[in-house]
Amino acid sequence: MLTSEANLPTYDSSRPRFPILEDARELVHYHDLLLSLVRRDLTVRYKRSALGFLWTMLNPLLTMLVMAVVFSTAFRFPVEHYPVYLLSGLLLWNFFSQSTTIAIDSLVWGGGLIHKIYVPKAAFVISPVLVGLVNLLLALVPLALIMFATGASFSWALLYLPVAILLALIFALGVGLFMSALAVFFVDIVDIYRVVLTILTYLTPIFYPENVVPPQYVSFYHMNPMYYFVELFRIPVYLGRIPEGYLTARAALLAIGAFILGWWFFTRKEDEFAYRV
Amino acid sequence: MSLPTVSNVPSPARSSANVIRLGQVSVRYRLPHERYATLKEHTIRWLQRRVQYDDFWALKDVDVDIAQGQVLGIIGRNGAGKSTLLKVISRVLRPTRGHVWVRGRVAPLLEFGAGFHPELTGRENVFLNGAILGFSHAEMERKFQRIVDFAELGDFIDAPLRTYSSGMVARLGFAVATDVEPNVLIVDEVLSVGDPAFQRKSIERIQSFRAAGTTILLVTHSLETVQRMCDRVIWLDHGVVVADGMAETVVQEYRNQMVGSESIRLAKAVGPTESQRWGDRQVEIIQVRLLDGQGEEQTVFETGDSLVVQMDYETNTPVPSPVFGIGIHRHDGLHISGPNTDFAGLELPELKGTGCVTFRVPNLPLLDGLYYISVAVHPKDGLVMHDFHDRAYTFRVINVNGKVKEQYGLFSLGGTWKHTPSWSAPSTALEAPGSSRNGLHV
């Protein structure tokens, strides 16, 4: 039963630590935990529904239909192929807002386990974001259908989408890690974050075209990080071209910055979670 | 909160005999002075420079070395730091100060069902739980069949967990947690669930770990289990190790000390809370007293003592001949006894005003443990309840001076033993011990 002495893992609480690196290594070691959590969330979500995974595709489609009808009749935005414009923005926004909202709650929710057993805690935060990613990828199917139905063109620029999605993923991970660590210490962070998200929904060009923003506010408008991620995703789909380099550069800067900040803060505070949650 | 500091704590020697070394381990919980867990409040207080904390040391300078293969029991009252000690060893909690060194894989026996999801099947839960314990999918595939066999789940393994009985969940949890071949097994109050057959199986598995050299840390309120299973016992009180040594000695010391302090603590806890009490209150039980043979109020009894339960009642309307009863439960919920006036053939008259009903046990047969008493008054047909206090009264039974020396099980049957030798010739004395002439084993 006992493995040979040399192979035994040893834990020494007084060894100097570099959590920012060690936690990454632990997460790699526990990669099956991450996959299991993702699998659990996906299975649980679709197990008892008749349409199963179809919901992921139907849901944005139905929301988009409602909004398309509302906004194209009530507000009459002069946007060509409005359903494609709307759906492309909506999918990326939903990915970000849903996955980060769930991620923030996850530590407080998963607190039971954190108290009983050693696990790399970041797995609880990362898995809902990966679940969101799976949902986003599935939702590309209805997007393609809508593009086809409305006669939008499919261009080579669509090959840029993996880059747009990857950057949005990294950004969402960073925000999720940072906010979830903060939420352990302050319970009202979750509510504050929801309010901020609601405000951002209207400050991001999702269902209206950017040109309705008065020119004097444009520079302020561009301070919203979500603007870049939505644009990177939408431009190849809707305009059929590769986004400008400066857009990609800013988005990459934001994503990597958010991720490093989130990972640093999370791993720095991780030891205190079990004291607080 | 600062990161743990290690200054002036000598690094323990990596002696091969020890698998766990704790050097001056302290754990501090900071409890905010008042509860202001929101950012808004915290900011306001911080601006007013009024963030204050109450420091609570769950462990204070604990020095313990645990050798490989030891079965170590940790005892102490609630809040003494037992669970915190386990958390520090299992890496859940990093100590505020001091030094923890553990060699080998540590497996906590999770509370049954922790980490399980009701919507997933047994199979999916096994893999999820294995992942939580740090195993890869491939490793779990090798273990899977063994786990299912041990848990005796059969075809249920592919049914959602919500369709399982609690016993099945317990079996699955135990099977996953103990198929890990740990070097250190941590058992925190989980052995008292499941049906008796499975409990025996669990104990056997733990015994086999022990035989194979696994170090076992055991926290339980059952001093009987501690005495039976442990080589060594640590007694914690307010985060400090007050005794450390042979199981028998430490447990006995602990019992002696409890006689004094426990009665004071329990005496305060008497009386039902709102959620423990229901009934239409046509008759109310207004006071309950537990008395010893001398008529003194007591909360600690010894096996063989007299126990008297006195119930004062008051009627709000005249009530025709109700039934008074009591229920006795062990701390883990086992219902031990439920006597009432009706079973005993005592017919009460119509009750008006106030009075007292007494239940007397001349020789308390219960052994060492914590017990709860419920009291009830209801009409003879039992269709409604006048007043019920659910497990609102506590008493402890302790064997100190040893009128009854029995240790195992729940109570003393008060039986007697006799030995009748059937041989007298000196030649039979050469027979091997254990062989018997009465024909049963021949």
Image: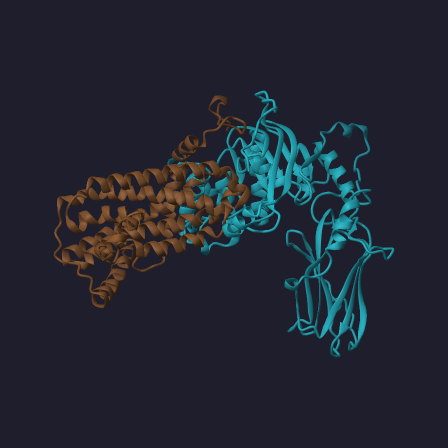
Chain colours: A brown, B cyan
Q: How many marks?
A: 0
Residue B286, percent across and down? 75, 67
Residue A89 visible in the snapshot:
yes
Q: Residue furthest right?
A: B294
Residue A47 visible in the snapshot:
no
Quadrant of the rendered structure where residue A175 is?
top left
Residue at 16% across / 55% down in the picture?
Answer: A147
Q: Quadrant of the C terminus of chain B?
A: top right
Give the side of residue B67 with respect to residue A112, left or right: right
Q: Give the camera-side residue of A110 and A263.
A: A263
Residue A19, percent across and down? 45, 32
Residue B366, percent across and down? 74, 51
Residue at 53% across / 43% down in the picture?
Answer: A115
Residue at 68% across / 35% down in the picture?
Answer: B240
Residue at 17% across / 61% down in the picture?
Answer: A78
Give the side of residue A207 with respect to residue B181, left or right: left
Residue B168, percent across and down? 50, 50
Q: Residue furthest front?
A: A216
Q: Quadrant of the N terminus of chain B?
A: top right
Quadrant of the rendered structure where residue A251 is?
top left
* Up/down of A235 relative to B18, above or below: below
* Up/down of A224 relative to B182, above or below: below
Give the side of residue B187 with respect to residue A29, left or right: right
